[in-house]
Image: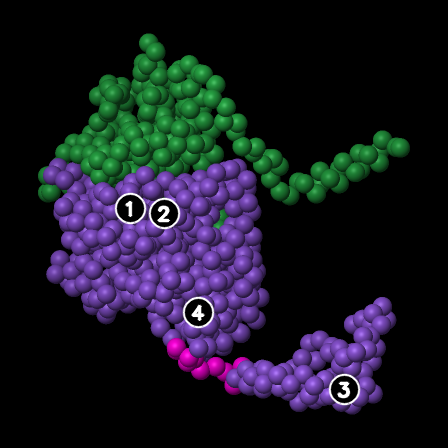
Chain colours: A purple, B green
Amino acid sequence: MAESPKARNFFESSRAAVGDHELRRKLESASARHLDHFDQVRAEFPPYDDQRDAAHRIKTDAIAHLDELLIGLAAKLEARGCKVFFAEDAADARGYIVELAKARGAKNVVKGKSMTTEEIELNQAFERAGIDAVETDLGEYIVQLRGERPSHILTPAIHLSKEDIGRLFADKFGIAYTAEPEKLTAEARSRLRRIFLNAEFGVTGVNFAIAETGTLVIVENEGNGRMSSTMPQTFVAVMGIEKVIPRLEDLSPFLEILARTATGQKLTTYTSFITGPRREGELDGPGEMHVVILDNGRSAMIADPVLRGALNCIRCGACLNVCPIYRRIGGHAYRSVYPGPIGSIVSPNLFGSAAGYLPFASTLCGACKDICPVKIDIPRILLHLRWKETAGEHALRWPRAIERARRGARRFARLARYPRTVRALGKFAAMVLKPFARNGYLRRMPGPFGNWTKYRDFPRPRPHRRPAPGPKRGPR
Amino acid sequence: MIVAEIHKIIASVKDALGAGPRSASHAPAPSIAVPVSPSARRAELASTFARELEAVGGNFLGILTPAEVTNRIVTLAGELGAMTVALGRGLMSDMDAIGEALERADCRIVRTIPVADTERAAMREQVANADLGIVEADFAIASTGTLAVVSTRDRPSSLTLLPPASLAIVQIDRVMANLAAVLAELGPGGVAANRLTLVTGPSRTADIEKRIVLGVHGPKSIHAIVVWPGDD
């Protein structure tokens, strides 16, 4: 398992995850598969980069006019018979939804895949209220059965092997063990089909909300979103404020690139355009529809011109798959609903300082920026967040070893203002260390410097003006 | 130079290539505007649609005249072993005739008609128990192999969602080049009027070890017919 139960913070959980070779194997194989698909798709679709530019432009523009767009969207939704609720924070949102479910006497709730409902911890709130809420996306269903949370925003059960899932189904349902994905999927289908047909209350997320028409767009591959939004009498869609785009004609670039980047498809299997509850005589659709529009820290991100760019995110999950950190520690180690590069930006802003270390969990290699379909400059924003943290806006508490290293760096910075002293010290060190060196390298050093030579040799300091002859040097 | 050695090299190259997909990356299609007759353009779009539909795991049954459509559907129902077929109302096609032909072939027909609130659960149960759902799609999208279906009172979205197999028929002049063209054709008013669903292939998941499995909540198999009226 990715998350050690005793892990108190990101440092402990990531250390545990790095040591988990089985997890590493699963992550590497899944990421590699994703990237193979992606490369192929990109080669076959020449307008990809133009569409990225268009998507970036539309989103940036939409965020810049977000207030007007939200007013327009809410008006359209209400005109079409939806109830709109603006939720300032997670507690507001889940309170509204759970109270509504109680008021409707709902016993069975079905949930389509939605990261926003994970963000507001809706399942836990339903549980406290004694309401049975079932995740219906296959991956979410699996992690819910295990009592876990998703480890990837797109493939929630990426940390599990088919054998893990086979054992889980055998345990929970008392069926014969099988590790065949087809059989496991068929089992889940028949169980969830019954649940869908009896559910009174459905909840899904939203991928795009079109202000011009008051239409919610939901994309998915399995059909859980369609089921959750058509079968139950009461339907609640939960969306972050940043999901709104101005016009219908703005939508196609997003749909063209979202599926390509996320899963290597040209278009997701199902794209639903929902505008209001069902009409008189219709078989499908909810009798009653509510839209919860959630802020939960997003408007504060808009206030910061650098951070604002992160709200362009369309949750495709591609940055996770290319991230060297994510690929080594997996999603659970981040200890946040949103893991990976984009999660490291979003989490501290939505969940506060508990996630404040995450912007440092990056090598700033830029792979995320290269793959991002809406061209978010993730490394730049991570640096910006690091700066904010170290400038004392949040004042994180670091582990002792890191504090020591920082104090050391600070001392060196002070010392480096006196070049003559540095040179004199260098000469002195060169003289003292000379007898201990072999071929110009030190294999062992005392005290705190030992951490360096544990893993690599240290070049023997040499006086400044006498560059060493190159060819003879080399690691042992 | 010995021939056997060349063969060895070729063999090792072939070996090395064997692991990955062999298709070359597609060169961008030349965008030269050549005057094309409308029917040639239609045929091109329909064949692109067919190719893309098959690429996402769908089954393209052909470009047929209205008379052929009915027979092909009866044959399909036989191939699938469908006992019960759910049928929505058509746009241009005569769905009643199709229903009658299926009944003559001993299929039970569920016709989706406007329902009162008290009848809803029973009607849903009937559609869910059907082996095949048939609907006339509003549009098809060639570049992605997608069917666009507007849900109405007598053509509910359930038809393409609940039965394990789904068949869509679409008129040739409603096969559009891409998504943007369909959205432009419908316009804001058309999109907002009723629920619109874009269906691209069978319901699928990759949640278990990223392996693709078809038929999660929606249909496991999806079939499409393009109708070309003979007089055109």
Pointer 3 residue: A427
**Which of the labelled discs sits on residue A58, or is there none?**
2
Pointer 1 residue: A246
Could you give the CA–CA distance between mark 2 and mark 4, rounded to whole angstroms?
Answer: 25 Å
Q: Is residue A430 above or below residue A92?
A: below
Q: Are marks 2 and 1 in contact (CB under 8 Å)?
A: yes
What kind of element bears circle 2? helix
Could you give the CA–CA distance between mark 4 and mark 3, rounded to whole angstroms?
Answer: 39 Å
Q: Quadrant of the N terminus of chain B?
A: top right
| Pointer 2 and pointer 1 on the same chain | yes
- Chain letter for the residue marked with disc 3 in the picture: A
Magenta stretch: give its range: A392-402
Pointer 4 residue: A385
Mark closer to the chain start, 4 or 1: 1
Could you give the CA–CA distance between mark 3 and mark 1, rounded to whole angstroms?
Answer: 66 Å
A70 and A219: which one is in front? A70
Camera-near label (3 vs 2) is 3
What kind of element bears circle 4? helix
| Pointer 4 and pointer 1 on the same chain | yes
Residue A386 x/y as whole percent: 47, 71
Amino acid type, mark 1: Pro
